[in-house]
Amino acid sequence: MPNVAVSDKKIEIVDACKEHMIYAETICHLIEEAAEVRETGIAKRKPSYIKKKMKDDKAVIALTGDCLVAGFCYIESWGAGKNFVANSGLIVAPTFRGLGLAKKIKEKIFLLSRKKFPKAKMFGITTSPAVMKINYSLGYRPVSFDHLTDDESFWKGCQSCTNYDILQRTNRKHCLCTAMLYDPDEIIEIKTRDKIEYEKESTVSI
């Protein structure tokens, strides 16, 4: 399990479960606080929503040795066939920022998402350059909004964002967020193509 040293403490990032439900209100407060500071796109959630994600094994949580919440992220699945997955609500408590914790949480939730939904396309929308950089390192690429799910319940979740009016005015084509997509089929295709090209270049005719 990924660990991050913080002075004389350790932060452990684990798959969230029922025993972590006691932290739901704290997590919601952190999400709301971050949304207010950024004045942009983090959708607010209720404790009951966060608890359900934990109960369904669709979240990861970062905790210090003395049980302080250092960070959190959860999985959303969209479409009738669950063919789109998003890692949402990525948050790091102010005290623990600047330590590379967001990247480790993102890597952990990415692996959990791939395990639970191996064939799904994974996407995210964000205004954070740091999150974009992390997504890019995991294999995501920038795309237009029409590459994302058309599931109405996903777009309904944007209603609590301060920029929702922009999304409405552009018929869901544009917003301040950048959309990024990880397509497992595309990744396989790229790796196969690169392998073929490498083998071609490694062959010398005499």
Image (spheres, rainbow, N blue to C red):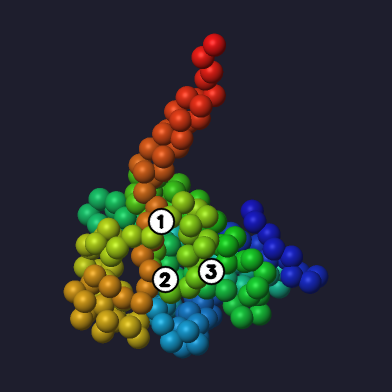
**Image check: 121 left or right of 150?**
right
Report if residue 25 is visible in the image. no
Q: Quadrant of the C terminus?
A: top right
Q: Is residue 8 above or below residue 46?
A: above
Cα separation, mark 1 vs mark 2, equals 13 Å
Label 2 secondary element: strand
Q: CA gap, disc 3 to disc 1?
A: 14 Å
Q: Residue furthest right?
A: 8
Q: Given this view, does label 1 or label 2 mark the residue nearer the observer?
A: 1
Residue at image coords 35%, 51% = 121
Give the answer, above or below, for where 73 lies relative to 93: above
Amino acid found under the numbered disc labelled 1: Arg
Counting from the top left corner in percent of width and height, residue 136 is at 48, 57
Residue 199 place in picture, x, y as percent? 50, 25
Numbered disc 3: secondary structure: helix
Give the mark nearer the N terminus: 1 vs 2: 2
Give the residue number, with chain letter if any, for mark 2.
126
Q: Is residue 68 above or below residue 85?
A: below
Q: Are marks 3 and 1 in contact (CB under 8 Å)?
A: no
Label 2: how many residues lie within 10 Å, few (<14), some (14-19) or many (20+)? some
- Per the image, label 1 sits on a secondary structure element best described as strand
Query: Mark 3 belongs to which amino acid?
Result: Ala
Q: Is residue 189 visible?
A: yes
Position of 165 with respect to 6 (left or right) is left
- Mark closest to the chain's N terminus, 3 or 1: 3
Residue at the image position 45 percent from the left and 71 percent from the top:
89
What's the mark number on residue 141? Answer: 1
Question: Mark 3 highlights which residue?
Answer: 130
Looking at the picture, how far across and down is residue 169, in whole percent? Answer: 20, 81
